[in-house]
Amino acid sequence: MEKSKNKIYLRPGQTAQLTSAYEKQRIENIARNQRKFEALGLLHATNLLAPFEKVTQTSLAKNSKRNASERDDNEYQPGDCDDLLSSSSSEDENNGHSNPQMEKVVHNGPTRKSSRLVSTPEDNMTEGSNNLQLHVPSPMESPASGAGSQKKNTRGKTRGKAVEKMVQKTGKLQVPIPTTERAPVGENATALANQIGIEIRAAAPLQDVMYWDDVDDSLKKSIILRVRDKFEIKNYDDDEVVRRAITKICQLRYKDWRSRMHAHYKSLLKNGVNPRNKPYKGVSQEDWEYMIDRVWTTNEKFKKRSEQNVVAHSSLPWNHSCGSKSFAATMSTKAKMPHFVDFFKESHWSKKKDDWLDPKCMEKHGELENLRTMCSQPNAIPMSEEEMSVAVLGKKSSYLRGYGVGRKPSNTKTTFRENGEEAIILREELTSLKELNETQQQQLEAQQQQISAQNKKLEMFQAVLIRCGLLSSDQCGEDSAEGC
């Protein structure tokens, strides 16, 4: 530590003198180039830069204005390459090399002009000097500078900042899950699904796990508890349908996460990039290499399932225009629940193009309209919206087409199983009610016995009063008539 004119200067410690990997590479390049110059009879590369001596002197003059204690530091240790960059005039004179001539080259670009100075060889240079090749670090070796600014800005992963602000302002966000829809509805439904994805990406494992159902139950509960810290999921603890709806979202979010990860891996291979050097964002190097070595390249079960998914995805007849919102959430935001036929048009119509997303959508909507018109005729057999969906769009066991992944057909095995489970619950509740009724009946009988015993005691007390002449039989009769 040095003191100078009421100023205290701290000498750099050991950490400040450490050399970065880039600096070490730079030093090696300078040393390599210097050896090439010495082989050509040139002692220093800076001999070629004499025209810039004035610029250097100007810079030194500016630096001379600094405080002497800032310039002269006894603890300063020069780098390994500082002696190679010195431009001592005495050495130039001793070696007898004259300064080469400099030529100004103008570069005309599409939008601007630029110029630079290049050296022209002197007559006393050897033939080999014309073929001098200097090692210049490639853009991949040098640190990124302005290249990042040319990258197209795209929306990144949801980080939940908007949800945090809303929770701080209004408390937990309310999210109902109706039994009929079997999916979150309302204005906070999409935020709930996004938050589940955030928590899964932060805590869910990738190794030794293929699906959400394989995740440890305790970890599942902790993830859902963190979600419930910000969202009030109505009847989650009491309703099995609500819990299954949340589980379904977790399954989809975990599956989407791994699917996007695999797509990133395949895009790197397609572009000729080593995927090990560019893990998916938010994934550790260890997990990333595990997915490459143990899942994507060696797991035959995964490969088969992946091929099936590719075929299934390519066979999708059309897409929808609801974006990230589920059909149930989109329907719930309407002032009035739309008819299925009207909602099909809304969810498959492009507002930007003012046209159908696909000609097949227009065809299917026409069939739905004809079916609705036919069912509205007198003496026609009425059809429910669910029956219209099955009749025109086809039957799917896992969900009802046109309603998203929440609502299920009423005649599916899943529905039968759930109805059977509900029947078991109802039977258990009925048994409990019967037991309660029997208990209450026993209590009522005990109370009747107590009342009978009290009436007998009252009659005995009245008889004693009559014998003692304190109460006449007529009065006792009147009291009995009044309920004595």
Image (cartoon, grey):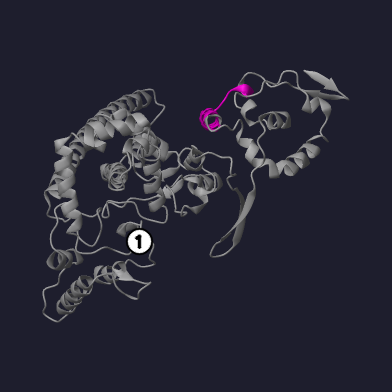
Q: In this view, does 170 lie above or below 357?
A: above
* Residue type marked 1: Thr
Indicate the position of residue 272 as horizontal and vertical percent values: 30, 45
**Quarter-of-image position of residue 49:** top right
Residue 239 visible in the picture: no
Residue under label 1: 330
Q: Is residue 277 above or below residue 83?
A: below
Between 140 and 47, the residue placed more toward the observer is: 47
Please state, as top left, top right, bottom left or bottom right, where the N terminus lies in the image.
top right
Between 23 and 337, the residue placed more toward the observer is: 23
Determine whether, in the image, residue 288 is placed left or right of residue 12: left
Indicate the position of residue 356 as horizontal and vertical percent values: 28, 73
Indicate the position of residue 295 as horizontal and vertical percent values: 22, 35
Q: Is residue 36 magenta?
A: yes
Q: As drawn, which residue projects farthest toward the bottom? A: 378
Q: As drawn, which residue projects farthest toward the front? A: 124
Between 29 and 214, the residue placed more toward the observer is: 29
